[in-house]
Image (spheres, rainbow, N blue to C red):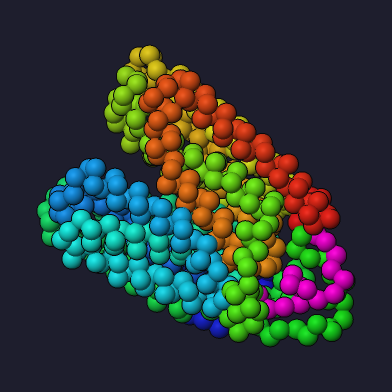
Amino acid sequence: MTTSTAESSAPSPAVPEDRAAPATPRATGVVAALRRRLHPDPTVRRLAGITLVNTVGNGLSLSVAVLFFTRVLGLSAAQLGLGMTAAGLCGVVASVPAGRAADRWGARRVLVVLVSVQAIGTAGYALVHSYPAFVALACLVSAVDRGSAATRNALYAEVLPADRRVAGRAHLRVVTNVGICLGTAIGAIALQLDTRPVYLTAILADAASYVAVAVLFHRLDIPQRPSATGASAPGAAVPEPSEPSEPSEPSESGAAVSEPSAKTAVANPSDPSGRGVKQGRRPNPALRDGPFLAVTVLNALLCLQFAVLEVGIPLWIVQETDAPRITVAGTLIVNTLLVITLQVRATRGTEERTGAARACGRAGVLLAASCLVVSLAHGLPAGFAAVVVLGGVALQSLGEVVAQAGGWALSYDLAGERDHGAYQGVFNAGTAAALMAGPALVGTLVIGYGMVGWVVLGTVLAAAGLAMRPAVRWAGRRDASPGAV
């Protein structure tokens, strides 16, 4: 992969290689270890820097949010729950139009606007003095947050070559976990001080991080990368339809293209100077793509795993087992460490859609096994219960990293090089729906039905993962090239 153009055309947070080389032999210890962990692609390094700034702020805000809303703003638990549910619904609805906007005006441009609004909205919490104002602001912040998530995914499709997107996203997810851990550690200090000014400072620091992220995205150059079909990447000149050999090249889906089409020989659809304007105005193709919608729904079911970790397991530990309550913190530590360690490795074998579908199947089985193992902690002595729960969380973490890798790969592969914003907007809407409904669904099953609830939940997760292969075969029939990338 060639990166010299991108590296020379924009400032990079990493030290240029020609100036860093003389110092490399003398780099030892922590510095050397950090350099080895840097991604070789300068674009991914820039995105990693942006992600770190963003997630440190997120971790800081998340760690103090509940106490800020209840103790500083004076909301009751019921008011907070209702407001956050309304905000979650707004997030689901916002993903699709945000993706379409990215196709029409360009992912980077839309992302800068959304992140800027998020900075203003987050800072606005400091000025809230009524419940209706809180709900309105929470809905705005959630809408731009989920919209920016969909737009970021479309941006990754622009700036990363097709065969590096999933691995690049895996690297960014590792950075995300590191950033949230750092932010949470800072937030722990705020929780210990436990004063109104400290909580306000934490919220405003998160808002400031969004300002920094908006500036960094604005300065991010779109590298000129040829696509697999020879088409120009965003920002590059659009090749003429009559260029030799273009029509006979295979498309991203593996199907031969007999003439220039929406999939080949065009600028990236998110380029606002080209096809993007027309794409943003016509009907959303992702909403009419049956195989893609099926994969989106199945992936959303797999995303119930996050509610299992964040809601189901903590409730189960506290209410239905004799495990020490500190085990709740242990589950988060185990999950974070395994995600950081394994997420990049989990992308191996997902380069082809059939491999990605198999990965989702394995993930579903692992998640189902995790549910069964965790359920067995009921009635055990404290120490054994804690060990069993942590073992179940280890299985859940393995399933999580594999499911994420497979889902990312399919979300890009089934869309091909077309309408990145539209497809990622729909895919992200499915994820947002799972994140919104998951806590109530998982909590009801686990606490309401005990071990039977865990079995039902595990069955749903396993079925969702295993159903990915038939969905991908359906996509293969659609493209007249079964199992092709």
Q: Is residue 255 magenta?
A: yes
Along the horizontal axis of the image, is 379 left or right of 160? left
Along the horizontal axis of the image, is 155 left or right of 263? left
Along the horizontal axis of the image, is 419 left or right of 215? right
> Which residue sits at x=78%, y=54%?
478
Give the magenta range.
254-268
> Which residue sits at x=35%, y=48%?
85
User: Where's residue 300, x and y in %?
Assistant: 54, 45
The image quadrant of residue 112 is bottom left
Residue 315 makes an appearance in the image = yes
Name the quarter where the N terminus is drawn.
bottom right
User: Where's residue 382, x and y in %?
Assistant: 33, 18
How many numbered circles are shown?
A: 0
Along the horizontal axis of the image, is 192 left or right of 415? left
In the displayed structure, would residue 94 be above or below residue 67? below
Residue 19 makes an appearance in the image = no
In the displayed structure, would residue 104 be above or below residue 184? below
> Which residue sits at x=40%, y=30%?
444
For the residue pair 115 and 345, the one nearer the viewer reads as 115
Name the quarter where the C terminus is drawn.
bottom right
For the residue pair 88 and 223, the one nearer the viewer reads as 88
Q: Is residue 313 magenta?
A: no
> Which residue sits at x=83%, y=83%?
243
User: Where's residue 437, x and y in %?
Assistant: 43, 43
The image quadrant of residue 384 is top left
The image quadrant of residue 471 is top right
**SS majority, magenta:** loop
User: Where's residue 275, x and y in %?
Assistant: 66, 79
